Image: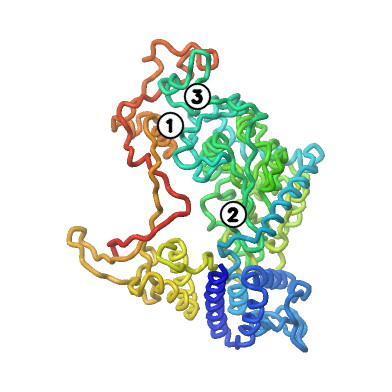
Amino acid sequence: MKSRIRLLFSDLSEILKAMLADAGLVCSTSTCRDFLTLKSRTENEGISFLTICLPTFAKGFERSIEAGRWLPDLFTGFKTSKGACLPAFLQGFTSLVFDSKKGDLHAIPSIDAIIAVRQICLAFNKVAMECTRQRQHSAGVAYAVCEAEVATFRATKWKLRESFLAASKWLYGSTLYRLARVLRDDGSLPTRHGPGTTVDGTSGNRKYLHRQWSRRLNRVLPFDRYWFFNFEELEQSLGLGGILDFTVVHPKDEPPVKVCFVPKTQKTPRVIAIEPVYNQYVQQGMMRVLVPSLERDKRTRGQINFSNQSINGALALSSSITKEFATIDLKEASDRLHAAVVHLMVQSQPDVNRAVFACRSKYAKLPNGKIIPMKKFASQGSALTFPLEAMAFYSIAIASFMERYSLPVHHPRVKDFCKKVFVYGDDIIVPTKEVDTVIDGLESAGLLVNKNKTFVQSHFRESCGIDAFKGNIVTPIYIRTVPPKTKRDASAVAATVSSANQFYLKGYWKTSAILRAIVESVMGTELPHVRPDSELLGWYSVSGHYSVMRWNSDHQCFQTRGYTVRIKKKADRLTGYRAMAKCFGEDVTKWANPKDDLFEEGSLQWYPSSSIESPFGMGAYPQNLDSWGGFFKLNEPLDEERFAVTSRRGAVYTKLRWVNA
């Protein structure tokens, strides 16, 4: 283990040494002293200096830019050089941005120096490495503390309650009506299973064989409509006395969500909550209706985004010049959104309200085994968290504006303000002149604004992966994985190739050369030059050069041979009606139109209710088939090759192939 850590440390140090050299050439400054400091501190403090201390330096640097002057209290871990107020470390770069004696921000700070400081300090901020057990324990404690703080929120005393209700009803009336209509149309919700694991460890195709449903969920979305797709399969699961092999779980027996950690940064892990199978199944269905509805609805189109980050990114870039918009980031956004806020937001559609809370878990099991009740709506892990939190943040911003100016929701000023608020998850963009109003509204709902990532006063803006200063993109290139040691580390190889190409295009050629040498020590020296849109692993060229190895007369094109990255599949047997259920989950259109192309293949046939002579006569199920409209009949086995395999999450491999150049 020690030898592996030593090799890893050596690789990361060499990468950072090359990065310092590249940055020094760009900014015409010496980095010899900086490298000696780097070497000394990493030997004493270990990798944590690269992954924790340097990112902390970058955060202080950003806050200093925001304040317009150097803030020495944010750099207590770094010695100040004699006769200057700036730390000796990286002073060759920081002095190009701030006055070295007074600490004031230069009237025209060096963009290259800002890029250099952030690149050097943030390069290893997001490297995928497990946190120490102590930090994981601290994250678990913080989760419980956060829950206790959320529990103090009282919706009845919330100052924005009425404005929030009015804003939500006006903004989401059409969207929630569409979802309610789908829920009322039995069996039409496009349910499917998510990609992750579940509380009981079920994964892959095993989820389709799950035989449980909660009583809370069954009252709103009966399993005979949403789990079974025809009467033949339903009949096989029933006995004369009731349910034979399908269990309806009582509320007191429902498993709590399992709180666990996944790598985020070395400082703190990302906390997620793993849901039960049936909750995840329904959440995915409602998410698949909500997200496209919000992105198409005239009142939220372009304002609330889920698949397009470029809107927020472009606004961050332009506002770094004009300061028209401020960027707000929330800390622990998912874990601090109270369930009562979501209830207020969706209560205009009772069917939606019942369904949303029927598939919401009420308890969480911490890593130490303790089970606590949840007042938050849901942590990351629920498929509904992302869309509902975005809706809530957007509504709170509008409600804050309404409350400040005592305006009704239909007032032209409110409608105009709606078009100036943009939300992507917990990244929020609002007009700079109204940022204090919005922040006050967010905090009144129990949310916590991340001051380190919120930018208002300066020319610095950060949103959706775009870091900008005065119209220049200053986003660093992140080393997201540890360097690969063998060809089997396919994901690390692909990530390192990508990083090498990004550094090459950025002009950090020494860094790119080090990363390229690491890859070639594993994969050999024959990786081709490729275009940026090629699926092959290979190297970019600023001149546009790419390798050509043969002419394919059959396809009438040039081709190149190289490695592609593939996702590993595992055999996961699934046949019959459960395979049909998976088939439906892959494409929403299969639900909406029984005459879709799928049914022309002969595998499935739709039988309308009028063709059925005698329905099941059990009280727990439909008394007549008109409520079903019909059912699907499996006429022949579905393609087992397609449905009897599942992806192994996170497992990839490389394969040699010929690809069109």
Image coords of residue 74 (percent x, y): 75, 72
Direction right: furthest residue: 157
Q: What is the CA distance from the residue labelled 2 to the residue labelled 1?
A: 37 Å
Nearer to us of marks 3 and 1 is: 3
Q: Residue at x 40, y 47 (%)?
A: 570
Residue 99's tag is: none
Question: In the rendered view, does 178 fall on the left or right side of 167?
Answer: left
SS class, disc 3: loop
SS class, disc 1: helix
User: Residue at label 3?
Assistant: 245
297 up-or-down from 510: above or below:
above
User: Residue at label 1?
Assistant: 592
Image coords of residue 254 (percent x, y): 63, 32
Q: What is the CA distance from the residue labelled 2 to the residue labelled 3?
A: 35 Å
How packed mark 1 is, by other alpha carbons closer than 10 Å (few <14, some 14-19, many 20 or more), is: few
Name the image colouring.
rainbow
- From where the camera sits, is residue 366 visible? yes
Name the kind of residue labelled 3 in the image. Answer: Asp
Nearer to us of marks 2 and 1 is: 2
Nearer to us of marks 2 and 3 is: 3
Image coords of residue 122 (percent x, y): 60, 70
65 up-or-down from 211: above or below:
below
In terms of depth relative to the viewer, which is nearer, 480 or 313? 480
In terms of depth relative to the viewer, which is nearer, 227 or 609? 227
Mark sitting earlier along the chain (2/1): 2
Q: Residue at x 60, y 87 (%)?
A: 32
SS class, disc 2: strand
191 up-or-down from 504: above or below:
above
Image coords of residue 103 (percent x, y): 75, 80
In terms of depth relative to the viewer, which is nearer, 77 or 320? 77
Mark sitting earlier along the chain (3/1): 3
User: Residue at label 2?
Assistant: 262
